[in-house]
Amino acid sequence: MDTLKNRDLENNILSNYKKQQMESFKEGKVNKPYFLKRSDKRKILQKAKFDSMKPKQREKAMERKRKKRLGKEFRQLEFKPTNR
């Protein structure tokens, strides 16, 4: 159920961005429309998700991401082979 909501949210955000770009192109504000790169799409979607969250939810999500990153760093340090 959540994946369907996320997919709908993603489609809405990206379609709104495309419409906005095409309107500015038709009005002559830009020479050619800008098509998003994958990394830019990811940034826009992440920002929209965090904006739609409540402050407490946002803090919990950030904490989970921080813990995940820390765990990855510790695992990399732990299994580093030594050259002797």
Image (tube, helix red, strand yellow):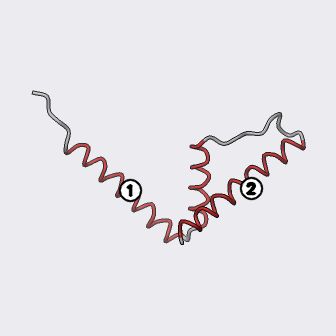
Task: Classify 10 Å Cα crowding around label 1: few (below 14), some (14-19), many (20 and above).
Answer: few
Residue 57 picture location, percent across and down: 49, 70
Residue found 75% across the figure and 49% down from its top: 18
Q: Answer left or right for 10 relative to 72.
A: right
Tag 2 secondary structure: helix
> As displayed, is residue 27 above or below residue 59?
above
Q: Answer left or right for 28 relative to 62.
A: right
Quarter where residue 47 is shown: bottom right
Quarter where residue 61 is shown: bottom left
Residue 31 picture location, percent across and down: 83, 33
Residue found 68% across the figure and 53% down from its top: 14
Amino acid marked by disc 2: Asn
Q: How many numbered marks, from 0 up?
A: 2
Amino acid marked by disc 1: Arg
Read off the residue under disc 2. 16
> As displayed, is residue 29 above or below residue 5?
above
**Pointer 2 or 1: first along the chain:** 2
Read off the residue under disc 1. 66
Q: Which residue lies furthest to the top in this view?
A: 84
Q: Nearer the viewer, mark 2 or mark 1?
A: 2
Q: Which residue lies furthest to the left in this view?
A: 84
Q: Which of 4 and 29 is in front in this view?
A: 4
Instruction: Tell me, for residue 31, which label it has, or none.
Output: none
Q: Answer left or right for 39 relative to 25.
A: left
Q: Answer left or right for 73 relative to 55.
A: left
Instruction: Name the image quarter holding the C terminus.
Output: top left
Instruction: Name the image quarter holding the N terminus.
Output: bottom right
Quarter where residue 60 is shown: bottom left
Residue 76 picture location, percent across and down: 26, 43
Q: How far apart are marks 2 and 1 (CA)?
A: 31 Å
Residue found 49% across the figure and 71% down from its top: 56
